[in-house]
Structure formats: C-alpha cells, structure tokens
Image (cartoon, helix red, strand yellow):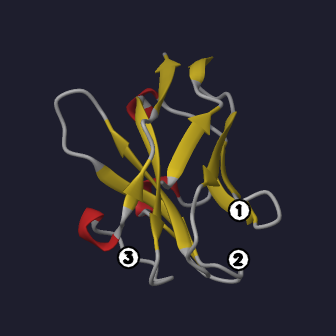
Amino acid sequence: QVQLVESGGGLVQAGGSLRLSCAASGHTFGTYAMAWFRQAPGKEREFVAAINWTGRRTYNEDSVKGRFTISRDNAKNTVYLQMNSLKPEDTAVYYCTIDTRDQLGTSESWYDYWGQGTQVTVSS
C-alpha cells in the first residue's frame, strides 16, 4: 500500500520560510513524478509545483514562481518544497502526490496517490 507522509508545516510570519517534506513508501512502481497541491479554507485544491523522476524538469504555478522550489531525493523517496517569502495567501493545507506516468500535470486527475496534508499558516 502506497503511503505519502508530509511534514514541515507550521505557523510562520509573512516573509518567512518553511521547508515541507513528503516521504513515499510501499510503492512497487518505477519512475514517477511528484507534486504539491494546496487547499485554502473555502477554496478548491490547487496545483503548486511538480517535479519529474530525474529532477531535471519542474513546473511551478505562477503565484509561487521565484519563491517556492521543488526538489527530490530518490534515494530517500522524498520530495521537498522550499517556501520562501511566504505570504498570508499561501495559508493552506499542503498535499503531496504521485503521478506514476512521470508527467508534470497540473490537474488533480493526473495523480494517483495522495498524502494526508500538512497545515501551513502565514500570519500578517
């Protein structure tokens, strides 16, 4: 059974930084892309960033470009999201997810497995 466990969320002041981690376990498939989505209160879940298996290709949503960086360590089956210059509008539950086709889709429908999420709160 595939498990994704996120960590690193918390409360931070605007302008601060957080680093999210997501460790995958229990999978038997080979190469896969990983991504982060987020869901703010009262809003739909939205794409944040994605990275392919080799790490050579990434894609970020426009509002986080220049502030967030996605990376991965395949030896640890872990994906990271470094979040800098955080804004109150970044407040959300952040979810990591896997795409077993190793694409960089921006829609939830591309993705096969999901974590439970970690809360990020940015105070003004």
Bin the neighbour count of mark 1 within 10 Å (Cα to Cα): few under 14, some 14-19, many 20 and up.
Answer: many
Q: Which mark is residue 71?
A: 1
- What type is the residue that disc 3 sits on? Gly
Q: Are marks 1 and 2 in contact (CB under 8 Å)?
A: yes
Compared with 92, 51 (above or below) is below
Compared with 54, 6 (above or below) is above
- What type is the residue that disc 1 sits on? Ser
* Residue found at x 65% / y 30%: 8
Label 1 and label 2: CA atoms lie apart by: 7 Å
Residue 97 appears anywhere in the view: yes
Q: Which residue is mark 2?
A: 55
Q: Are marks 3 and 2 in contact (CB under 8 Å)?
A: no
State which tag comes first along the sequence, 3 or 1: 1
Compared with 58, 56 (above or below) is below
* Residue found at x 52% / y 48%: 3
Q: Which residue is mark 3?
A: 105
Label 3 and label 1: CA atoms lie apart by: 16 Å
Can you give x and y, in whole percent of width and height, for residue 45 in the image?
27, 47
Can you give x and y, in whole percent of width and height, for residue 90 in the image?
44, 35
Residue 67 appears anywhere in the view: no
